[in-house]
Amino acid sequence: MPSQDTFIDVSLSTQAKKPRQVFVAYSYRHIDKKDYRRAFESVGKAFDVDFVFADEKISSLHILQKIANYIRESQFGIYDITAWNPNVTLELGLALGMGERVFISLNPEQTEMSDVPSDLKGVDRLQYKSFTSLEEELERLISQILPPPRNEEAESFLSRLQDKIVELVTKTPNIGVTTIAPAVGVNIELAKLAIRNEVGVRLSATGNTRGTKYFPKL
């Protein structure tokens, strides 16, 4: 860890924040990197968001300064405090000290909830018990704060895609997104986005996330 006499420059920067960047801190020791990041990759593709990770253990001023720069240039940060990793706790404290917007994420089944400091209990959090539910929580958060950028061309494309999906589901009800996406010629992330906007409008859904099936809304 950095020694007590190190100095981190957390002064306000004239550099503008990157419009669709989000900083993520989590414990590499307690969380499977490949499966964990898959949730972020899926949401990042669907919402055109760049999730950045500090892949190095905090062991020097240089690395901590790099992390401070990531935090400062991101729109906000997600700090996974599952199992209370010291590095993540340090990064969270750094972000709070810099006055940056933070969200806490955690798996309550792997975290001693009584250890959560009282001053963090009011911070918005994402709770998950699987990487599937983590992806759902990320989708909910990003759709509220950083929805996909829209323009006339994109709106027109999305509208046509939604019409194709509704037509397909009407002809072949009880199908999932892995069937819908290739049938309409788009990737799964884009199909999910189009379907999400239609559920409750022209489509109905049943089942859990991985096995959700879609039907025309009656």
Image: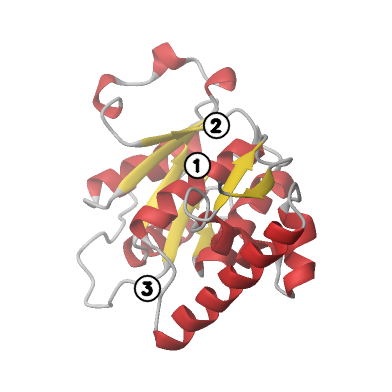
Q: Which residue is mark 1?
A: 137
Name the amino acid type tagged 2.
Tyr
Q: Quadrant of residue 164?
A: bottom right
What's the mark number on residue 18?
3
Q: Residue at x 69, y 58 (%)?
A: 169
Q: Residue at x 31, y 56 (%)?
A: 8
Disc 2 versus disc 3: nearer the observer = 2
Marks 2 and 1: CB-CB under 8 Å? yes
* Circle 3 SS class: loop
Badge 1: how crowded within 10 Å, few (<14), some, or many (20+)?
some
Q: Nearer the viewer, residue 187 or 35?
A: 187
**Cα gap from disc 2 to disc 1, whole angstroms:** 7 Å
Disc 3 versus disc 1: nearer the observer = 1
First reached walking from the N terminus: tag 2 or tag 3: 3
Q: Residue at x 67, y 35 (%)?
A: 207
Can the viewer see residue 23 in this picture? yes
* Circle 1 SS class: helix
* Circle 2 SS class: loop
Badge 3: how crowded within 10 Å, few (<14), some, or many (20+)?
few
Q: Which residue is mark 2?
A: 128
Can the viewer see residue 3 in this picture? no
Badge 2: how crowded within 10 Å, few (<14), some, or many (20+)?
some
Q: Quadrant of residue 36?
A: top right
Q: Quadrant of residue 213?
A: top right
Q: Is residue 65 above or below residue 36?
A: below
Q: Is residue 204 above or below residue 154?
A: above
**Cα gap from disc 3 to disc 1, whole angstroms:** 22 Å
Q: How is the image coloured?
A: secondary structure
Name the amino acid type tagged 3.
Lys
